[in-house]
């Protein structure tokens, strides 16, 4: 894509190269440079596709222009990303000016993050069919616009960066809590999101939101070693062995969020990182500073009425001020309707109802949450909670 500029054609050529590798390598052996082999074959396939596509008009001229060396087509407007890896460059290129921010995120998650259409749809709280149409329209819009894929010019950079950060945030979330499948998390996705965020932070160390997002990822991922039991079962934070949390990630994350907040421009990622730091630095659930967490969520909600943030706020209020206070906020979220079909709403309600002593209602809410949960590990945990309350 960086070399030739056309999303669909590059995607088709890459797929053909992968098919060729799957056919040839088992017979001929794996080449010494597998990546180089794939790029070479894909480039040849892409050139063939371009020649076929342009056969009726300006054949030789168009093909010659589209197969220029990478250094000839690489933009010079922003040299900060010149040495970044191709994954980062691809992130910026997918944040195409012909697309709405939502479509930029969806297309990038599909092309760079490797998420399925269903996984992206769940991240956006829409149906799979709606997301399929959105991604298809995004590709068509890019084709119709005639604008080449490129790194953004200086005037576009800040807006594109915000989209890139949101994409990395969603990729990390999908890796930390998989929306489907048997496993609770997908380490490949969360690790890749952290790696890419480190690259962005290396390029833009003065940006507080870049720093805040990296801190948030590290502080959250630090808990991953304790999130699953021996058989892959979900272990809630209240029951986790905090000695298994990654101390190095916690130390680095706390230092990063502290550095970011000192700049005096607190954004959403910095605030979320500060909340994560309060959790990570508490030796037990009981010693957690829930009132401070409530205050931070209230600051976060001033800039965005995000339903997921409101749900977390309800949990914090329930822990700080009693389950009835949290349940009243859950009722308000139900009226809004955005999270009605989301298992997390029922799971939080069940937890708060159990805290309040409403065991029969809590059991029903756990069952309702299990029925909605897309991940098998979550389903098993929620069903186990319901069964526990039936005894």
Image (cartoon, rainbow, N blue to C red):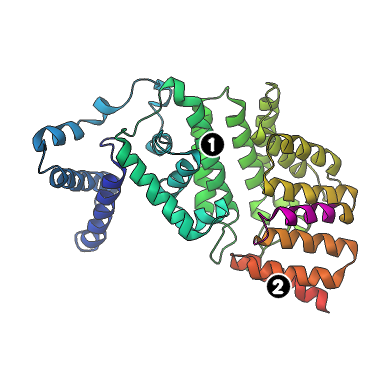
Q: Is residue 334 magenta?
A: yes
- Residue at 79% of width from left, 50% of height from top? 314
Q: Quadrant of residue 363?
A: bottom right
Q: Residues within 10 Å of mark 1 (few under 14, many from 20)?
A: many
Q: What predominant SS class does the magenta segment belong to?
A: helix
Report, in whole angstroms, how far the alpha carbon at label 1 lies from the one at label 2.
35 Å
Q: Position of residue 59 (x, y in %)?
A: 10, 38
Q: Quadrant of the N terminus?
A: top left
> What label sits on residue 165 in the rendered view?
1
Residue 191 placement, left or right of 286 = left
- 260 left or right, relative to 45: right
- Residue at horizontal 71 percent and vertical 22 percent from the top: 262
* Residue bearing the label numbered 2: 383
Residue at image position (55%, 39%) is 166
Above or below for 101 versus 123: above
Which residues, given as a range, are shown in magenta? 326-341
Instruction: Give the answer, above or below, for where 156 lies relative to 135.
Output: above
Q: Is residue 91 above or below residue 223?
A: above
Indicate which disc residue 54 carries.
Answer: none
Residue 353: % across, % down: 84, 63
Secondary structure under badge 1?
Answer: helix
Which callout, 1 or 2, points at the residue further toward the start of the chain?
A: 1
Category of crowding for the residue at label 2, using alpha-carbon neighbours closer than 10 angstroms: few (below 14), some (14–19), many (at least 20): some
Does the rendering let one see residue 116? no
Question: Where is residue 92, by image quadrant?
Answer: top left
Q: Residue 102 at x, y = what percent? A: 50, 43
């Amino acid at each position: 894509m960086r070399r030739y500029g056309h999303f669909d054609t590059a995607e088709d050529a890459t797929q053909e190269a992968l098919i060729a590798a799957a056919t040839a390598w088992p017979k001929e052996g794996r080449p010494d440079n597998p990546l180089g082999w794939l790029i070479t074959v894909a480039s040849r396939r892409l050139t063939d596709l371009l020649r076929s596509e342009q056969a009726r008009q300006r054949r030789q001229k168009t093909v010659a222009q589209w197969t220029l060396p990478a250094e000839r087509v690489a933009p010079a407007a922003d040299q900060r990303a010149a040495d970044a890896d191709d994954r980062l460059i691809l992130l910026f290129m997918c944040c195409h000016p012909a697309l709405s921010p939502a479509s930029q995120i969806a297309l990038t998650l599909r092309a760079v993050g490797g998420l399925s259409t269903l996984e992206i749809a769940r991240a956006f709280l829409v149906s799979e069919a709606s997301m399929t149409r959105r991604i298809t329209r995004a590709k068509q819009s890019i084709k119709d616009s005639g604008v080449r894929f490129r790194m953004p010019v200086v005037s576009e950079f800040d807006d594109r960066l915000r989209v890139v950060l949101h994409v990395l945030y969603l990729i990390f979330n999908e890796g930390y809590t998989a929306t489907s499948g048997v496993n609770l998390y997908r380490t490949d996705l969360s690790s890749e999101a952290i790696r890419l965020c480190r690259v962005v932070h290396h390029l833009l160390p003065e940006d507080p939101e870049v720093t805040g997002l990296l801190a948030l990822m590290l502080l959250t991922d630090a808990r991953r070693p304790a999130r699953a039991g021996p058989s892959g079962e979900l272990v809630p934070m209240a029951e986790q062995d905090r000695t298994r949390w990654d101390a190095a990630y916690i130390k680095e994350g706390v230092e990063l969020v502290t550095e970011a907040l000192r700049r005096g421009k607190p954004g959403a990622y910095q605030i979320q990182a500060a909340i994560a730091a309060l959790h990570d630095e508490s030796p037990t659930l009981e010693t957690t500073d829930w009132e401070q967490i409530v205050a931070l969520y209230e600051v976060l909600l001033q800039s965005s009425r995000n339903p997921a943030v409101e749900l977390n706020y309800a949990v914090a209020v329930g822990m700080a001020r009693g389950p009835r206070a949290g349940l009243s906020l859950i009722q308000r979220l139900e009226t809004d309707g955005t999270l009605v079909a989301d298992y997390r709403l029922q799971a939080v309600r069940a937890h708060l109802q159990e805290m309040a002593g409403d065991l029969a209602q809590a059991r029903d809410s756990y069952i309702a949450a299990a029925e909605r949960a897309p991940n098998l590990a979550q389903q098993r945990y929620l069903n186990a909670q319901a069964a526990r309350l039936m005894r």
